[in-house]
Amino acid sequence: MTHQTVGHPAPVRPGLPDDPRADVAEPTPSCPVEITLAALHGRWTTLVVREFLRGDHTFSELRRALPGLSDKVLSDRLAHLTGAGVLDRHRMPGWPPRVRYSLTERGRRLGPVLQALWDWGEPSLHREGHSR
Amino acid sequence: MTHQTVGHPAPVRPGLPDDPRADVAEPTPSCPVEITLAALHGRWTTLVVREFLRGDHTFSELRRALPGLSDKVLSDRLAHLTGAGVLDRHRMPGWPPRVRYSLTERGRRLGPVLQALWDWGEPSLHREGHSR
DNA sequence: CTGAATCCCTGCCGATACTG
DNA sequence: CAGTATCGGCAGGGATTCAG
């Protein structure tokens, strides 16, 4: 099943699993797949990203949207996503201190990724041509 | 929801983040995104799946392909992926005992998922129209 | 309001040794 | 050949408390 019918072009396709850069023998942080999984890593992380796909948020807005999430973990997640290039952090001047977080361009591109994860996990619903 | 949208198209799109089924306030195992991440969860797991995207394998073939992976963890991963519906387990008759693992149909559909993860993690390569 | 510091507990992963 | 049994180290996550 790994080799294709002869005569056809492109015996090695770009991307997985045939891309030579996919030939890592150990889990390494430089592997693109690992980079993405690292960005999404941790409990609550995907839910936080989902909130941002709906719009910007401040710290306390997120706390209201995800009541089960503790301050510490929320803080961890925001720092982690910021470090991963998913979120931008904007300190608003004045009092009380407010910080607004928003998706970066790269963060917005997580939409299709989460959609792919959703589609695979969706038990038995085969939508034929959904456009997103 | 009985009446159709007039004027502007698609205020709520199917899929994320607007799908009502995405409105979970806590991480729950029934969320499709969580299901997929659970299937891919754990160190080495994506590398094992990659090996299977290239073809079937026995236990020792995998050990050769991924030398850094210990017997115990390999065994864990195979059991986990089998339980997640990604792999099929075939006991071959005769001696020595051999067990062949192969991707299920559902497991094969992980290919595009890993590709999406790869594409996001790929640092700065924007090919505008690559088709996979 | 937005976090950081601390503590504890759990679960993963690796190494080693052993079995059908 | 294809696993299981056991143990130990370490990082992740939750609750609570404190700080800028």
Image (cartoon, coloured by chain):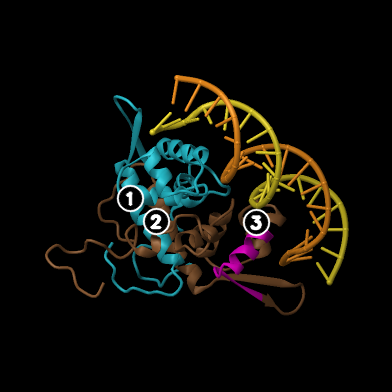
Chain colours: A cyan, B brown, C yellow, D orange
Task: Determine which residue is flagged by label 2.
Answer: A114
Q: CA distance from mark 2 to mark 1?
A: 10 Å
- The count of marks equals 3
In the image, is residue A117 above or below residue A32? below
Task: Determine which residue is flagged by label 1.
Answer: A53
Q: Secondary structure at mark 1?
A: helix
Instruction: Judge by depth and name the residue closer to the eye, A77 or A59.
Output: A59
Q: Is residue B89 highlighted in magenta?
A: yes
Same chain for the residues at labels 2 and 1, yes or no?
yes
- For the magenta stretch, what is the residue range? B74-90
Same chain for the residues at labels 2 and 3, yes or no?
no
Instruction: Judge by depth and name the residue closer to the eye, B100 or A110.
Output: A110
Q: Residues within 10 Å of mark 2 (few under 14, many from 20)?
A: many
Same chain for the residues at labels 1 and 3, yes or no?
no
Q: CA distance from mark 2 to mark 3?
A: 33 Å
Q: Secondary structure at mark 2?
A: helix
